[in-house]
């Protein structure tokens, strides 16, 4: 009996030791993955381990295929080579389902950086057990999302790929939002714009970039598919980011269209709305809200679009301010209703 207890204690000790080592190696991998260079002494200090243990762990990580090169000498250490593959991660069954379902929900959404959806799907399924694979495949058959074709759920539309310029814009914007972009509204008529980027977003199956035009003092929404040759601007900023945001807030308050919505209008607003409109929720449980828009009353196409959209929001729409040009179009829409 005594020997059995000792044996169990030793097993428990060894198990904990293995677990601690596995966790430590994973942490060291994450630590060095965020660095271009490191030394054994740094690993010792960071993880409070001996030099021999640090060397053993780094050798084990290198044996896994982690791209390290050794640099000898007084200022030596390890250099981390650029690697396009991330360290392995482990997911629970529920986490794997959540990731897989999220990826399914993004079908035909023009995701940035997505080059091969099938390859990613196969990798997600490949890390699952046979039982988990069966569940994931069944989930793919059962669940339908907004961008799924009900007649053929597995069909990927041609527009599943994002515009070519989108990745470049995102990569630049995370470094500097003051950009120089070429905007080509009509083929053969490019415009060079100096802009401050506010947001990149997807609206009604189209990627748009919200910018402040530093030359014309205007806020604009540009289709990403009409942009090219984006780069960080070398010009000096005329206004700071805070000054630009203050301009935007001030112009929203001075808007010529001010609308209140009920709960139905809020739900329909969430389903579809023109780019850049901010809905402020004013009632409890999202029972009421309002928004302001500055409309160009000389743009007949924009006025017609807004008239149709406002009617879509339902009978709970209340106008606090409305341009007379838009009011006329709404009255015409209602007057032209036909009943058989």
Image (cartoon, helix red, strand yellow):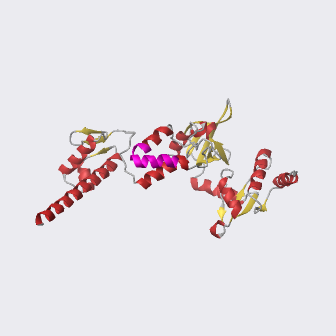
- For image coordinates 61% across by 55% down, the residue present is 245
From this view, report whether residue 314 is shown above or below residue 189: below
Residue 10 part of the magenta segment: no
From this view, report whether residue 339 is shown above or below residue 153: below
The total number of labels drawn is 0
The reply to whether residue 332 is in sight is yes
Residue 131 part of the magenta segment: yes
Near-viewer residue (236 or 32):
32
Q: Residue furthest top?
A: 188
Near-viewer residue (57 or 167):
57
> In which quadrant of the rendered image does the N terminus lie?
bottom left
Among the 4 quarters of the image, the one containing residue 20: bottom left
The image shows residue 227 at horizontal and vertical percentages of 61, 37
Q: Main secondary structure of the magenta part?
A: helix
| Relative to 125, 237 lies left or right | right
| Relative to 145, 305 lies left or right | right
Q: Which residues are magenta?
A: 124-140
The image shows residue 234 at horizontal and vertical percentages of 54, 40
The reply to whether residue 232 is in sight is no
The image shows residue 116 at horizontal and vertical percentages of 49, 37
């Amino acid at each position: 009996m005594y020997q059995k207890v000792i044996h169990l204690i030793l097993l428990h000790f060894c198990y904990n030791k293995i677990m601690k080592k596995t966790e430590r190696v994973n942490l060291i991998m994450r630590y060095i993955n965020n660095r271009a260079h490191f030394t054994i002494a740094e690993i010792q200090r960071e993880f409070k381990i001996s030099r021999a243990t640090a060397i053993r762990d780094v050798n084990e990580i290198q044996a896994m295929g982690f791209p390290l090169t050794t640099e000898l000498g007084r200022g030596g250490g390890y250099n981390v080579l650029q690697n396009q593959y991330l360290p392995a991660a482990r997911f629970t069954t529920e986490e794997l389902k959540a990731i897989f379902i999220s990826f399914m929900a993004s079908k035909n959404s023009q995701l940035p950086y997505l080059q091969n959806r099938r390859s990613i799907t196969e990798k997600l399924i490949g890390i699952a057990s046979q039982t988990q694979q069966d569940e994931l495949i069944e989930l793919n058959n059962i669940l339908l999302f907004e961008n799924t074709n009900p007649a053929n759920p597995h069909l990927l539309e041609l527009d599943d790929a994002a515009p070519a310029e989108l990745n470049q814009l995102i990569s630049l914007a995370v470094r500097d939002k003051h950009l120089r972009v070429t905007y080509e509204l009509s083929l053969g008529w490019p415009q060079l714009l100096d802009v401050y980027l506010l947001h990149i977003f997807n609206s009604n199956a189209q990627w748009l970039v919200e910018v402040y035009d530093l030359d014309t003092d205007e806020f604009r929404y540009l289709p990403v598919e009409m942009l090219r040759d984006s780069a960080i601007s070398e010009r000096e900023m005329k206004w700071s980011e805070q000054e630009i945001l203050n301009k935007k807030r001030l112009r929203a308050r001075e808007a010529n269209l001010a609308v209140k919505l009920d709960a139905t209008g809020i739900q329909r607003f969430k389903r579809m709305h023109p780019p850049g409109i901010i809905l402020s929720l004013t009632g409890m449980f999202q029972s009421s809200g309002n928004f302001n828009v500055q409309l160009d009353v000389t743009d007949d196409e924009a006025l017609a679009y807004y008239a149709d959209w406002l009617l879509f929001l339902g009978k709970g729409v209340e106008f606090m301010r409305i341009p007379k040009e838009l009011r006329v179009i709404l009255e015409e829409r209602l007057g032209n209703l036909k009943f058989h």
